[in-house]
Image: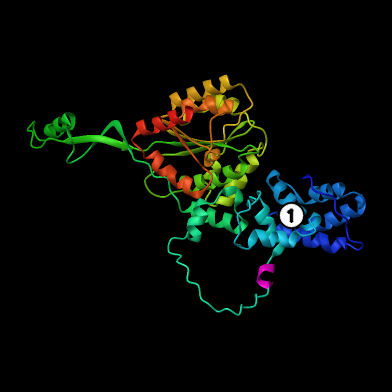
Amino acid sequence: MPKYADLALPDNPKLMSNITHFARALRKAGLPIGTGRVMDAIQAVQAAGFTRKRDFYWVLHACFVSKPEHRPVFAQVFRLYWRDPRYLEHMMAMLTPQIRGVQEERTAKAAEKRAAEAILDGAMRDVPDLPEPEDTTEIEIDASRTMSSQERLRTLDFELMSTDEMAQAKRMLAQMALPIKPMRSRRMQARTKGALADWRRTLRQAMRQGGEVTQIARKSPRDRWPNLVALCDISGSMSQYSRVVLHFLHAVSNHKGPGWARVHAFTFGTRLTNITRHLHQRDVDAALAAAGAEAQDWEGGTRIGACLTAFNRDWSRRVLGQGAVVLLITDGLDRDDPDGLARAMERLHLSARRVIWVNPLLRWDGFAPKAQGIAAMMPHVDSFRAGHNIASLQALADTISLTDDLGEKARMMAYLQ
C-alpha cells in the first residue's frame, strides 16, 4: 500500500454510496468491476469493520483487484478518492493546461492521469467560464511551429499516457508495419531475363525438340523473407512498455502483404514463455488476454540470463534459422550472474543475423551502461534503440532496413566508452 499522510474521515462518510462511486471510478479507469464485486466489497467492509484505514485499503483491494497490472491504478484512484482532501484541485491541475513559471514541474506518475480522468468523469465540462477582462486587446500567437496533438502523442512516454491517449496510441500502432527487405537465397528460380543461364533446363527443352537448342533458359537467385523473433521483458519495471510493444508485434504479425516469413514472440521475467500462437488471433485484446493468461510471471522478478539460456537451448535452432532478426525488449536490469548473461547474449548474437536491443532507459539523455547486466549485454548487440514512445517504435523500421552496420557499430562503441 502506498504511504500517504493519515487524514481524518468525516463523521458521516456514507460508506455504501461512496464505495459504489469508488467502484464506478475504478471501472472507468479500466478495471473489470461489475455489480457483484461492488456488493461483495460492501459486505466485506461491513464484516471487517472500519477501524483502521490500512485494513480498509486492503479489503477493497482484495475485492476489486484481480491482476497485477491493476494495482497501480487502484492505488492512485484510492489515494485521490479517499485519502487526499484536495484531490479535485490536484486532478484539475493534472488535466487542465496551465502556463507555469520557472518552478520545477512534477512529473505525473504512472496511472495518475487515468485515475484523475476516471474520478472527474466530465467534471471538466461543468467548470464555469471565466469572466472576460475589461481589456479587449487581441493577442495574435503564431502557432505554425507548435506541436500538433498527433505529434505530441508520438513523442509522449507510454508510462505517462492517460486512458484516452493510450487507446489512441494503440490505434496508431495497429496501423504500423515493420518492413524488411528480402534476402537473396542460394536457391534459383526461372526468370525470363535472369542474370544466369540455366543449362539444365535449356538441355531439357532441347531434348523435347530433337536436341536442337532454340532458346537459352535463364535463372536468378530467389528472394526469401527472414523471421522476426521478439523477446519481451515483462518484469515489474517493463510491464507497461511490453504491453504496448506486444500490441505493435500483433500488428506486425497480422500485416497483410510481403514481409516477415514468420513472427515469433516470447515473454520472459522469471521464466521463458512462447506466446507466438496467441498473436495469430485476429482480435488484439483476445490475443493479449490469452498471452497474459499463459505468462504467469507478469510484473515479477527479472532473470534475463537464465531466460536467454533457456531460449538458446530450446528454441534457437527452431526459430533463428535463415537469417532471423531478434528484437530484445528489456531494460537490462538483471540480478543474476553477469558472466552467465554475457555467455547467453554471445550465443544469441552468433545464432541470429542481427540483434536489436530496444531499451526504454535510453530515453534519458544521461544514460550510461553502468549496471552490470547492461554492460554484459552491450558488446553482443548490433543496434541499441529506445522504445518508450510511438516515434521510437517507428524508428525501428529504419534500423532494421539499415545497411550501414559500421555506423551502428560506431554508435555502440560510443555507449561502451
**Lateral position of residue 6 relative to residue 292, left or right:** right
The one of 399 and 103 positioned closer to us in this rendering? 103
Helix, strand or loop under label 1: helix
Residue pictured at 47% horizontal, 60% vertical: 146
Q: What residue would you read off at disc 1? A: 77
Q: Number of marks in the image?
A: 1
The one of 77 and 137 positioned closer to us in this rendering? 137
**Residue 159 horizontal/vertical position (percent):** 60, 48
**Residue 27 horizontal/vertical position (percent):** 71, 58
- Can residue 117 be seen at all in this image of the molecule? no
Q: Is residue 212 magenta?
A: no
**Residue 351 in which image quadrant:** top left
Quarter of the image that includes the N terminus: top right
Name the amino acid type tagged 1: Val
The one of 158 and 349 positioned closer to us in this rendering? 158
- Can residue 415 be seen at all in this image of the molecule? yes
The one of 128 and 353 positioned closer to us in this rendering? 128
**Lateral position of residue 135 relative to residue 175, left or right:** right
**Lateral position of residue 156 relative to residue 39, left or right:** left
How does the figure colour the protein chain or chains? rainbow
Residue pictured at 88% horizontal, 62% vertical: 13
**Residue 4 horizontal/vertical position (percent):** 79, 48
Q: Magenta region: which residues?
A: 123-127
Work out whether 327 lies above or below 172: above
Give the main secondary structure, helix, strand or loop, of the magenta stretch.
Answer: helix
